[in-house]
Amino acid sequence: MEEQNKQVQLKNFNRRSVLGYIRKNGAATKAGLSAATGLTFMAIKKILEELEELGLIRCDAMEKGTVGRHALTYVINESYKYTIGVHINKFATRVALMDLRGHILCIERCSMERIFQNQSVFVETIVAAVEKVTAKAGIKKEDILGIGVGAPGPIDMENGVILTPPNMPFLNYLPLREVMEERTGCRVYLYKDTNAIAFGEYWDGEGKQASDLIYIDVDMGIGSGLIIDGKIKVGANSIAGEFGHITIDVNGPRCNCGNRGCLEAMSSGIAVLRELEKQLEEEESHPLYPKRKELVIEDVFEMVERNDLLTISILNQSAHYMGIAVSNLINILDPQMIILGGILIQNYPRYFQIVQTVANAKKVKGARENGMRVSALGENAGVIGAGEIVADDFFNRKVNEVFPRNGGMQE
């Protein structure tokens, strides 16, 4: 019996390896899979036949070989099952239904401008959006693998609780995983928002060719997500990637977390607005002077379009601090890829250029430049990544439940 269990485990490992390679590369041939996994061509052929019969993959097209022959290419069967991704941030909560290749089939945007009276109303808003996207796409509940949620940290991963997000205090100590599982009947995966975004970039964005990457969210707050060897790095206490709360200046401005001189207090959208308000007190002729106490981030970008030097100088200083912080991150982790996204990156292109220049100038001399990119997924990165978290758990663990317990296969 023990030997039989070992054989089943080996078969399942090889099945998952084939699925994983196809998923990461988008498509694969028998020859490519054999070379990548070390399995014989015949073993690959048997695995592919089985996976195709189970409906997990499908034959996609003919690929022309180097000597005129044609090879079949295989892809993940995107309609085998579906995932739901939820991304919560200060401006909007997005809920999307996706197929198993990370394509959004239907998405709902819930504005966060309204003031939620309590956590129950907020959760009901998310649940209603989940039901809406599922109904719109015509997908049955039993075909949903689960719901991935990216929420502002810190997160208690073990218990599925949002702890004390500095910029969204109404979410304090919300047991979101348990409540949503009760309300939806689906398994819920709760992760920090920037980890979800990083995972989206890894699977479907600028990080597709990297095994290690760091995503930095330059938004109203500052956060980051770490992917190491294709896995989200959560940390011993679920706080890995709290990049916004590294100290830049011990005597700097007070951060919402309670400490002084955090990167978030000096480079975030909130920090930009705070500094702009402060400097406007001495600029009575400035167009924004009359509303200096009621500034919103859109005011900043409007002034940039008008080439306002005061606003531009504040954004440039913010980017400079960010570049210093990124150089420290490079010196510690030396990642293959660094991806920057968020409202400041998206709306002020020079921000990225300054970060890149400063980071490369201040990192260890002589080292090659690390890949640095702007997020290509934009505002949908979070929901895509949250859905991919569900898909990743399926392909690496729950897919074992789909495989037959025995049956001859690979050599």
Image (tube, rainbow, N blue to C red):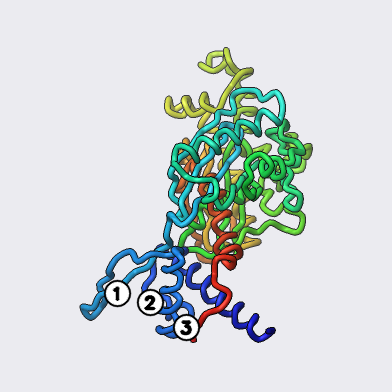
Can residue 38 be seen at all in this image of the molecule? yes
Vertical relation: 122 (above or below) 204: above
Label 2–label 1 contact, CB within 8 A: yes
Which image quarter holds the N terminus? bottom right
Work out whether mark 2 precedes mark 1 in sequence or the reverse, and give the earlier one.
2
Pick the residue in front: 147 or 237.
147
Crowding at mark 1 (Cα within 10 Å: few <14, some 14-19, many 20+) = some
The mark that comes first in sequence, 3 or 1, is: 3
Rounded to the nearest angstrom, the CA distance separating label 2 from label 1 is: 8 Å
Distance from Cα at disc 3 to Cα at disc 1: 18 Å
The disc at residue 39 is 3
Q: Residue type at mark 3?
A: Leu
* Image point (65%, 23%), residue name: 115
Does residue 24 sit above or below 321 in this rendering?
A: below
Residue at mark 2: 30
224 or 20, nearer to the observer: 20
Element assignment for label 2:
helix
Report helix, strand or loop for mark 3.
loop
Q: Mark 1 points at which residue?
A: 71
Image-quadrant location for residue 49:
bottom left
Q: For the point 72% across and 47% down, which residue is it?
A: 160
Drawn side of residue 319 relative to residue 34, left or right: right
| Amino acid on which the number 2 mark rests in the picture | Lys
**Residue at 43% over, 79% down:** 46
Q: Position of residue 283 (x, y in %)?
A: 58, 18
**Direction left: furthest residue:** 68
The amino acid type found where label 1 is placed reads Ala
SS for callout 1: strand
Q: Residue 328: which quarter of the image?
A: bottom right
Disc 3 crowd, CA 10 A, few/some/many (<14, 14-19, 20+): some
Q: Is residue 358 visible?
A: no
